[in-house]
Each structure stands twice: as C-alpha cells, then as structure tokens.
Image (spheres, helix red, strand yellow):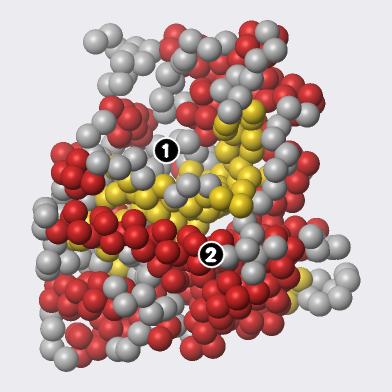
Amino acid sequence: MGADVDAGGFGPADRQRFRDRLRDSQQALEQLLADGAFDRPRGLIGLEVEVSLADADGAPRMVNDEVLTGMATSDFQSELGKFTLELNMAPRVLAGRVFDDLAEEMRIAFGYADRVGAEFGARPVLVGILPTITGDELGRGNLSAGDRYTHLNDQIMGARGELLQIDITGAETLRRTFDSIAPESACTAVQFHLQVTPERFAEVWNAAQVASAAQIAVGANSPFVFGRELWHESRAPLFLQATDSRPPELAAQGVRPRSWFGERWIGSVTELFEENLRWFPALLPVCEEEDPLAVLAAGGVPRLKEMVLHNGTVYRWNRPVYDVSDGVPHLRVENRVLPTGPTVTDMIANAAFYYGLVRGLAEQAEPVWNRLAFEDAARNFEEACRHGVDASFRWPRRGRGQGSEEVGAAELVLRDLLPLAASGLDSWGVSAADRDHYLAVIEGRCRRRITGSGWQTRFYHRAREAGANREAALGHLVRRYCELARSDEPVHLWPL
C-alpha cells in the first residue's frame, strides 16, 4: 500500500473527489430549497433505541450477531459493539394516543428481544452505559461485523496517530488509553426524529438546542463508566473523547471535535451542512455513482448520499437529516442527547417532554434564543450532564429585556418548561390522557429529585456501605435495575 493511501484504502484523489461531491451536494440542496421541492407534512416522528446486552450476572454479552439472526426482523440492527442492538421504530404522526401506541410497540419489541436473547444467555438492558463494563472488553475485536465499523475505527485512529485517551473527572476520575474507538460502543441512546418544513427547520433546531439541557437534567441515566462514578450523564464526555479524531495538538489549538454541541444559533439548515464541509475532514470518503447536479438538471431528486454519509460522522447532539421518501425529499431534526432507559414508560415520557417542549419553544412570540447567549445554552448542557436534576442553568428573566438569571433545573422545568411542553403537545393534537400521563412522570422526577442516574448512584453507595466491593456492588446494581425495569414502573418510584 502506498504511503499516500490510508488503512481504509483511501488516497488524496479519493478525498478530493469526495469534497467536490460534497460541494455539489450543497449546491443541489440549496436549489431544492429554492424550488420548494420538500415534503410539507408536519408532525411526523420516529424513534431509535440502542440497548446493551448483558448476561445473568449483568456483564456485557458479545452476541448481537447471534441474537439478530435469531430474531430475523429488520426492526433491530447491530450497533458499534458486539454487545449492543438498535431498535428502529416506524414513523408516525404526532397526534392522538401516539405515546401510548409507541409504548406498547416498544414493550412488544423488547419483550421479543428478551425472549430471543435468553437463548444466547443475553438480555437487553435499558441503560445509557452498562455499569458493569470494565473497559477490558472494549477492543477492536469486539466491534460489530461490518466494513463501516472497521473503516470508521481505522479512519479515526489514523487521523489521531496515537492511542485514544479517555480522561474524565466527576465524582471519581477515569484515565485510560485504548487502541480503538470501541469505548464509544458503551454509549447507548434514544434518538428522537421530527420531520419539519425547511421554513421551520432553524427555529426547531434552535429550540432543540435550548431543550437539550433540560432533557439531560430530567433524563440522565449514565453515571458509571468502566467502574468509576463520573457525571450524571457521562455519555457526553465519553462519546466526545471516544470519537475524537484530533491529535492533542490540534485539540489544543481549538480545532472542533466531531462530537459537539455547536457554537451558534442558526437561520437555515444549509448553515449546518456548510459547517460540516468547512470544518470536518471526511472519515469515509466513498463516492456514489449519482451526480447530484446532473440528477437535478434532469428533473430528478438526488439522494445526496455523500452529504448524508459525511453528516453521519459529525456527531452533533441535534443533527440535521436530509432524506428522500417515495421520490420526495424531506428534512428532520435528530435529537441524540438522551440515554436509553430506565423503562419504556420513562423513555416515552422523555419523548413527550421533548416533542412538546420543542413545539412550545418554537412558537413563543419572543424565542428564548433571542434572549439567551449560545454560550449559556452550551454551558447549561454541560451543567446538566455533570449534575443532572440538581444542575443550575442560566435562563432569561421573565419579562422582556431583563437579562438572565441563575435557576435550578428542577425549578425551571416545573415552573416554565412543563407548561410549555403541555401547550406544545396540545398544538400537535396529542390526547389529554397521553399528555397528562407522561408529563406527570417528568414532574415526579423533578419533585422527588430522582432520575435513573440518581437511583443508580444511591443504590451503589448503599451496597458499598453494606460491605460490597466495587465489582459486587455494580453487579448487584445491574441485576436489581433489570428486575425493576421489567415492572415498567417509572424510575422515580423505584424502591432502594
């Protein structure tokens, strides 16, 4: 292999061709927007749920390929690690009893995964980071089968030019090195999709950015990484470091990481794709045969596969999505901030809060992002990841032109954001029964100051105080967690 060709077989010519194709895709996107070619429906949503597989002792079980073969369904797919799966739920309209319908479908799907997984000594665990993962299991050999995962690993590690460094300090400190991006596979998440019109994309994306801190505050569920207690939502720093293609010297110079919150409010979806092109080198510079400008000139709708592929390797917490369905292009906001679990009821409550809050924020006469500095929104996100429901946020004072104030996350959700979410769900046409049932779960977490992370850490410390060592306490935690999760009782009502 020549010195100018990397481990994935890509050379300078491949990268230049891919970059040229990205520019063509950007031009095609702008023309499609100008032509009004996009689908107009509003309120179409979709969910993806990633889960870990564990054995009877709560340790990760590397059998996703066997479980997927046994299930024989396209609803589940592999994820980065051999101990992870992803459930893809069919899109539906956000109206009526949509959340009860989602909950029932999710229970059936995970019940099926549980039954099939049992044949291979594995069960799905609805948690952001499986507490019993030690890190020793996370090597290149435990990446799921598939060229995409291998190429992604080779490209990130090749760009770094050195071992991956994980360095996170929270309640405890974790410092470890790895020879692959496998630590990212420890992060499992719920992703909410919302289809929007081009005219509303910017305000919905800005609203999702504002909402992210509150989502984390009430939904944190990842306090342990490789046996160490870190942040309430440790996925954020772990994912950032595990996908970081920057050598340390470039990180010190301020080069942007591939996993990030962003740095400004936007006025159009094209700004996000322009940022992708300007700031992020291609990790997988694979060109398709389609010439997007030629397809457009012929009256067709280009799939813009290079732009979609590149966008998939820029890990924004709120990501723009371009897709084509039945020959018609559409845009979605993909919200990626929340961890999996603890229960189906909890995840559907998180969905109701998110979809309602985004609509409520986007329809305010004076949007929050006109009164809140983006730097404060980014700070709120990090504070929520660190402290969960006990975080403190910067937030615009009530009234116009009154500056910002410091307010507790739980207080802000109870005082301002839950009413906004309720009004947003009403605007979507969600039934009052669904609205009240699922938003009451969010209210209960705030009033009791308990989330999945809070329950996990309290249980762990009680086990340690009772004499269990670290390993035994974490194993006991996962087994008890799985037992309670099967009841589908929301986490703020779980006993310790």
Quadrant of the rendering where the N terminus is positioned: top left
x, y percent for residue 220: 44, 69
Which residue occupies the foreground of this view, 149 or 20? 149
Name the residue nearer the viewer: 347 or 188.
Answer: 347
| Vertical comparison of 231 with 20: above or below | below
Residue bearing the label numbered 1: 246
What's the residue type where badge 1 is placed? Arg
Label 2 sits on a secondary structure element that is helix
Judge left or right: residue 217 versus residue 7: right
Farthest residue toward the right?
Answer: 400
Quadrant for residue 429, please give it.
bottom right
**Residue sitting at x 61%, y 52%:** 93
Asked if the residue at tag 1 contacts the one at tag 2, i.e. Cβ–Cβ closer than 8 Å, the answer is: no
Residue type pointed to by label 2: Phe
Lower position in the chain sequence, tag 2 or tag 1: 2
Residue 299: image location, x then y, percent: 70, 12
Q: CA distance from mark 2 to mark 1?
A: 41 Å
- Tell me which residue sits at (84%, 63%) in the image: 366
